[in-house]
Amino acid sequence: MSGLPLRFAVQFSQYAVFLYFLAVNSVYTMLIVLALRDIVKHAYLSTARTARRQLGGEFYYKPVSVIVPAHNEAAVIAQSVRALLNLHYPEFEVIVVNDGSDDGTLAALREEFSLKSSIKPVRLQVPHEDIQAVYRSAEYPDLIVVDKLNGGKADAINAGINVSSYPVFCSIDADSLLEPDALLKSSKLFLEDDSLIATGGIIRILNGCKVEGGAVTEIALPPGTLEAMQVLEYTRAFLSGRTGWNALNSLLIISGAFGVFRKDMVIAVGGYRRTVGEDMDLVMRLHRHCHEKGIPYRILFVPDPVCWTQAPFKLKMLLRQRNRWHRGMIDALLFNRAMILNPKYGGTSLAGVSYFVFVELFGPLIELFGYLAIPVLCFFGMLSVRSFVLLLLLAVLWGISINIGAVFLDIYNFRRYKRNSDILRLCFLGGLEFFGYRQLMLLERLKATLTFRKRDWGQQDRRAMGLF
């Protein structure tokens, strides 16, 4: 009898891990199917001609404030701002917020854009650290630079919101490049749907691409495996993940690298909260606010407006980034824990929030248990061959199929990568991910779970754009 509880525990553990991978991969497969439907539905957004009709007078437009938080971005800030000033949009302002940089970021802006002191009034609508000075470019009157004490990315965006003049704002990272018509394609949605309060476009990896004059002129996979693996991750996360959540009205993340928001709604929730996961936290609080106030709303991801961003090119940088992302997710879930399994928040809670709690938060623990259980059970001769084969099929082969499905979803709709060798390499990486890379990311997420209260952002190294 003494062996029965142990045998039951062994069988239960094998079935638990099996059911976990079955549920997770079923969700990913469902998201790919929903993403395909959603991408086809929004296919008209994929042509620059449709978006540029606004400039021909067929559509009205809303002026947009582009807010660029910058901390120690001297290597890229001038190139990034010049690219933003060349956006195809009738009326916009660019607000660069120097968040207490100590590497010459402000000096680079002064030299490149002939900054002069400005007496522009600042409305204190959301909290932030003290502003030291406000500048305006003598050459570009729509370029404003805010110099403030360091408070972090969320704090810097709040300062930009207070300085901004327009009803819609776009937040973009300083190391990123928007395609010239990305702002048109995103802001157009706010005219077509009065209930829209936030939208984000796709983030693609800049590494490996050729950049000239602040624009991507040639698209290719980066030569390094570490950077190329991130291209695969971004393709899967944005095209099959966030596009799929649209169909369930449960999108919880608009990337901090590129998001467009109705300013009045962001002010209504108190602006950005100071956390390392400010992008997810803001979107969750927008969901909460609208549900609690009975406000009809929509938060959308659209697959065509493109923002190109630098990905970590060193393993240490990548682990630091993933650690921060996971800590930010945990903090956002804890701060908005009222939404967990709460019917009051509808499908947003029951689908989106539940996914992040049971898959993204607890998933690494279950996955680690599965990895540890296999050799232990094998050593004691208690491993069921049938269970092992099923787990292999679910965790690896099905996962590889999902990766390849995401790659072909991208090819079918956009074909950004023209070289067949790049496409084949992405498919190969879709299998390679499960043999080392995935386990490394898993360990970093577990480490982040144990240290989630840390508020350290960490500094990422930058390369000058075009030097890839």
Image (cartoon, rainbow, N blue to C red):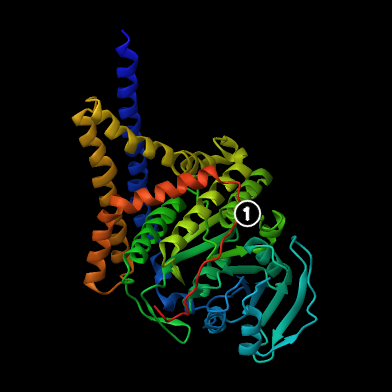
List x then y, in percent, for residue 424: 22, 65
User: Neighbour class for label 1 at 10 Å: few (<14), some, many (≥20)?
Assistant: many
Q: Is residue 63 visible?
A: no
Viewer can see residue 98: yes
Residue 90 lies, in percent from the top left, at 58, 82
Please state if 204 lies on the left or on the right of 326 as rendered: left
Q: Position of residue 268 (x, y in %)?
A: 71, 55
Task: Say which residue appears at 63% left-offset and 68% top-offset.
Answer: 168
Provide the residue designation for mark 1. 275
Q: Quarter of the image containing the C terminus?
A: bottom left
Where, by quadrant of the figure, is residue 110 drawn?
bottom right
Q: Residue at x 46, y 38 (%)?
A: 362
Q: Is label 1 in a helix, a strand or a loop?
A: loop
Relative placement, left or right, of 145 versus 210 is right
Q: Is residue 339 above or below residue 462?
A: above
Q: Position of residue 74 (x, y in %)?
A: 58, 78
- Which part of the image, by quadrant, shows the N terminus? top left
The residue closer to the viewer here, 372 or 172, is 372
- Residue 61 shown left or right of residue 268 in the figure: left
Residue closer to the observer: 346 or 445:
445
Please identify the quarter of the rendering in which residue 191 is found.
Answer: bottom right
Question: At 68% across and 46% down in the image, what residue appears?
Answer: 293
